[in-house]
Image: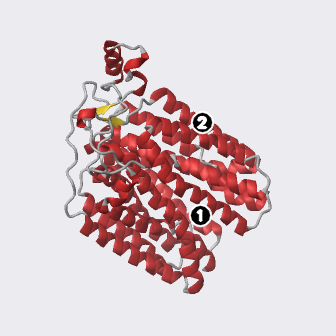
Amino acid sequence: MPAAVMRRAVRETVSGLPREFWWLWTSTLINRLGAFVATFMALYLTLDRGYSASYAGLVASLHGLGGVISSLVAGVMTDRFGRRPTLLVAQGSTAASVALLGFMHDPVAIAAVAFLVGMASNASRPAVQAMMADIVRPEDRVRAFSLNYWAINLGFAVSSMGAGFIAEFSYLAGFLIEAGMTLACALVVFAKLPESKPVQAAKEAEAPVGLGTVLRDGRFMSVVGLSFLVALVFQQGSVGLPVAMGRAGFTPADYGTAIAVNGVMIVALQIPVGRFIEHRDPKSLLVISSLLAGYGFGLTAFAGSVGVFTLTVCVWTLAEIVNAPTQTGLVVRLSPVHGRGRYQGMYTLSWALASLVAPVMSGVVIDRFGAAWLWGLCAVVGTAAGLGYGLLMRRLPAEEPVRESARGSVPEAVREPVRVSVPEISQGADGVDSDLRAAIGAGLGVTAVPATTDAPTTSPHAGATPA
C-alpha cells in the first residue's frame, strides 16, 4: 500500500473523535499494558507457591465470580454516581487489591483477595463503555469501539510477552508493576476526563432506569442471551483448545504458536476491518460473525497439524474482530441514555458468566464425549446465535440525532433535551455564580446544567424503580 494511501487511512480512522475519547483510550492502553497477573497467575500458584492445579483453578473461578458480581454493581454505580467516580473507585481498588495479592501466602487469603481483584478489575468496564457512548457521536461509535478493542489487544499482547520476563525476575514485581500502572490509569481519569453522565431537567424527566427496567427489556435481554452464547464459543480458544491440542499430542509450544495468531491478527486487522464495517448493517455483521465463530471452532474437529489449527484460529479471530465493536455498539443503541451504565453492566455480565461456564462445559464434553463433540457443539451454538440475531434485529430502533458542539469535541447527540453535567460546577449553592459556571462549562466544551436532587433520570419505561 502506498505511503500516501496509508497516511490517509490512518487519518480517517483517528479523525473526528473527541479529545476525551483519546484520554479514555490512553487509560485503556495503559491498563492492558500492565495486565501481568492474569497471564502468570496459574504459574505463580503452581510453580512459585507449590499449590495444586485444582487450587489454581479454584482461584481462577473465584476471580471470575468477582467479575460476575461487579458487572451489575458497577453498572448501577455508573448510572447513579457517574462514570468518572466509578472509574476512579474501580481502578483505585484494583491497584490496592493487586498489590495486596502479591503479599498473600495463606491459601484462604489468596483466594479471598483474588475474588476482590476480580470484582475491582471488572468494575471499570460498564463505566468505560458508558462514557465512550456519552462522548462519541453515534455514527462514530463502532469506529471508537474498534479502536478501544485494538488498544486492549495491543496492550495484552505486549504485557503477555513482558509477563514471562518479569516472572523470571520476580512474581512480586509483576503484582506491583500492575498495581502501579492501574494507579496511573486512575490518575489519567482524574486529571483529564470530566464527568460525562447525561442529566435531564426536572420538567423533562421521566421514571428512572433500574435493574428491573433492564430485565423487563425483552429485546435487550435477548441480545444479552445471544452475547452469552457467542462468548461461550470464543472462550474455547483459551479453555477448550489447549486441552484438546494437549490430548491430541501437541505441545504447549504448538498451542502457543497457533493462539499467537489471534493477537497478531487483531492488532493488524482491527483498525482496517473496523473502518470497513463502520457504517454497515449490524444485523448482517452479527449474523456473519456468529457463524464464522461457530464454524471456525467447528473446523477444529478436522485439524491434525499445527498449520490447520492456526487456520481455524484465523477464521474465528476474524469473527471476533467483527463481533466485538458491532455488539458493543448495538448495546449502546438499545440502551436508554440515562441507563447506559446498567445496560452495559448487564452486557458485561454475559461475558463474565461465559468465562465461568465455558471451562466446565469444555471439560465435561471433552472428558465424556471427546473434543470433536465440543467443536461440533460450538458450530451448533454459533448457528443458533446467528439465527437469533437475524430474527431479533429485523426492526432496530433509530439512532439518536446528532448535532456537533461548538468546539466539535463532545457531541450533542444527547443534549436536546439532555445536557452533559459537570458535577464540580453545577451546584448553585457552592458559591459559584451562574456566569462563571457557564464560562467554565464552555471551556470544557460542555453545557453545565444545575443538578437538582429531584430530577430523576430518563427512561422509556414508565413506572420503573431504580436498582
Residue 344 percent location from the top left of the image:
40, 51
Mark yes or no: residue 251 visible. Answer: yes
Secondary element type, mark 1: helix
Q: Amino acid at mark 1?
A: Gly
- Badge 2 vs badge 1, beta-carbon distance below 8 Å: no
Name the residue nearer the viewer: 448 or 298.
Answer: 448
Q: Is residue 88 above or below residue 387?
A: above
On the rendered structure, is 314 left or right of 57?
left
* Lateral position of residue 276 relative to residue 94, left or right: left
Mark 2: few/some/many CA within 10 Å (<14, 14-19, 20+): many
User: Residue at image x 44%, y 42%?
Assistant: 78
Q: Nearer the viewer, residue 154 or 189?
A: 189
**Percent position of residue 222, x then y:** 33, 65
**Nearer the camera: disc 2 or disc 1:** 2
**Residue 249 visible within the image:** no
- Pick the front one: 192 or 269: 192
**Which dot marks residue 237?**
none
The residue under label 2 is 183
Q: Position of residue 42 (x, y in %)?
A: 68, 60
Tell me where residue 294 sits by quadrant.
bottom left
Question: Which residue is label 1 attached to?
Answer: 256
Secondary structure under tag 2 reads helix
Q: For marks 2 and 1, give the CA distance.
A: 31 Å
